[in-house]
Amino acid sequence: MPEQSGDKTYDATPHRRQQAREQGQVAFSQDLGSAALLLVGAGVLMVWGRGVCEGVAAYLAFQLRTVGTLQADPGAFVEHSHALMRQLATWLLPILGVLMLAGALSSVLQFGFLFLPEKLQFDWSRMSPLAGLKRIFSLQGAMRLGFGLFKVAIVATVAGVLLYRRRDEVLLASQMSVPVLAKFTVELVLSTALWTGAALFVLAILDYAFQKWKHEQDLKMTHQEVREEMKNLQGDPQVIARRKQIQRQMALNRIGDKVPMADVVVTNPTELAVAIQYDPQTMAAPVVVAKGAGVIAQRIRRLALENNIPVVERKPLARLLYKEVDVGRPVPDQSYAAVAEVLAYVYKLKGKKMPTPAAA
C-alpha cells in the first residue's frame, strides 16, 4: 500500500506549502525572466531607440563644434561631466526603468512577493567545489545542459531563417551609404532579437510549466508526513478524539439534568430538538434549557418521552431556536408568539390552563 511503502501520494497541505515558500522553494523559471527582458528590451529600443540615437548624434555634433572653446581646468571638466551625466540619464533612465520593471514583474508573476533576508547571507557550502561538481554532473544538471543546447539550436534556427529571408538585402549592404547601412543594421538586429525573444519566451513558458509540475511533485507528502503534521499542528488525534468524547459526555450529562425540567420539546422532527421551559412566576419569557442535533437530538427526545414531556414537531421554529438561541437564554421576541402557541397546545393536551405571568 502507498502508506506502507512511503510513496508521496498526498497533495501538499497549506502548512507544507507555506513552509516551502518561507524556505524559498517556489516554482521559478529563470528563462522566463530572461526571455521577457529580451522581448521588452527589443521592443523598447524599437520604440525609443531612434530618439536616443538622434539625441546622442546631436550631443556629439554639439561637442565637436565647441571643442575649440573647451577649457582645460577642473571646474570646466566637472561641469562638462555633469552635463554629460544629465544627458545620459535623460536617454537611458526610461529604458533602464522599463527593463527593471519587466524583470521584477517576471518574477512577481511567477511566485508573488517573497522577501527572504536569510538568502542574502553568505553560505560557505555554495563555495564547495565538490558540491558544484555534483550539481554539474547530476541528472538535473544534464537536463539543464540539454535544454540549454536546445535553446541555442532554436536561437540559431530563428536567426538563420530571418537572415536567409533577407539575404538579398544583406548582400547589397556593401553598396549602401553609411547612414542607410547603420539604419539597416540596427533594424535587422532588433527584429532578429524580437523574434528570437518570442521563441525563447514560448520555451520559457514550457519550462515554467515543467518547474511548476516538478515543484508540486516535490511538495507531495507521504501518509506518515500528513499524520505527523496533523499531530504537530492540532495535537495527537487520539487525544483529540478522547477530548471530544469527554465533551460529548458532559453535554449529554447536562442534557440529562435539564430536559426533565422542560415543559415541551420542539423538533424538526428527527434532525433537531430544542427543550423549552417556562415558569411565569420566575421567567419573563420561555427559556431554552437544552438543544442538539443528530445523536444529541435523539437523546433529548428519548429523555422527553421517559419524563412524559410532550414532543411537538415545528420545523421552522426548531430551526430558528437551534440556530439563534443559546442554551440558558430566553426565546427572541419574534419567536415568542410561536412558542406561546406551542405551550398553549401542550397545556391543552394536559387539560391544564395556560399559566399567566405574575404581576410586576
Image (tube, rainbow, N blue to C red):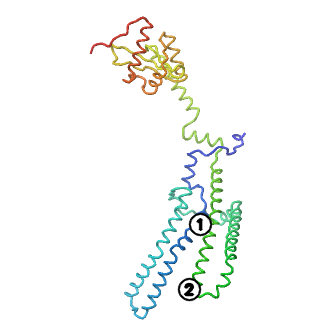
Give how far across and how far down residue 3 sits, in percent. 69, 40
> What kind of element bears circle 1?
helix
Q: Label 1: few (<14), some or many (≥20) within 10 Å?
A: some
The kind of residue on which mark 1 rests is: Ser
Q: Can you tell which of label 1 and label 2 is closer to the viewer? A: 2
The kind of residue on which mark 2 rests is: Pro
Q: Looking at the rendering, in which quadrant would you find the N terminus?
A: top right
Residue at horizontal 61 percent and vertical 87 percent from the top: 176
**Residue at which label 1 appears:** 34
Residue 230 vertical position relative to residue 48 in the rendered view, above or below:
above
Q: Return the residue found at the far bottom.
A: 68
Give 78 or 55, whichever is nearer the viewer.
55
Q: Return the residue found at the far top.
A: 351
Compared across the picture, whether 75 is left or right of 216 comes to left
Which image quadrant is residue 11 in?
top right
Give how far across and how far down residue 131 sits, in percent. 66, 63
Which image quadrant is residue 10 in?
top right
Q: Looking at the rendering, in which quadrant would you find the C terminus?
A: top left
Give how far across and how far down residue 109 sits, in percent. 54, 58
Residue 351 vertical position relative to residue 13 in the rendered view, above or below:
above
Residue 139 vertical position relative to residue 14 in the rendered view, above or below:
below
Rendered image: mark on residue 179: 2
Residue at horizontal 62 percent and vertical 58 percent from the top: 208
Q: Distance between the residues labelled 1 and 2?
A: 32 Å
> What kind of element bears circle 2?
helix
Give 73 or 81, whichever is nearer the viewer.
81
Residue at horizontal 42 percent and vertical 5 percent from the top: 351
Give how far across and how far down residue 233 sits, in percent. 54, 41
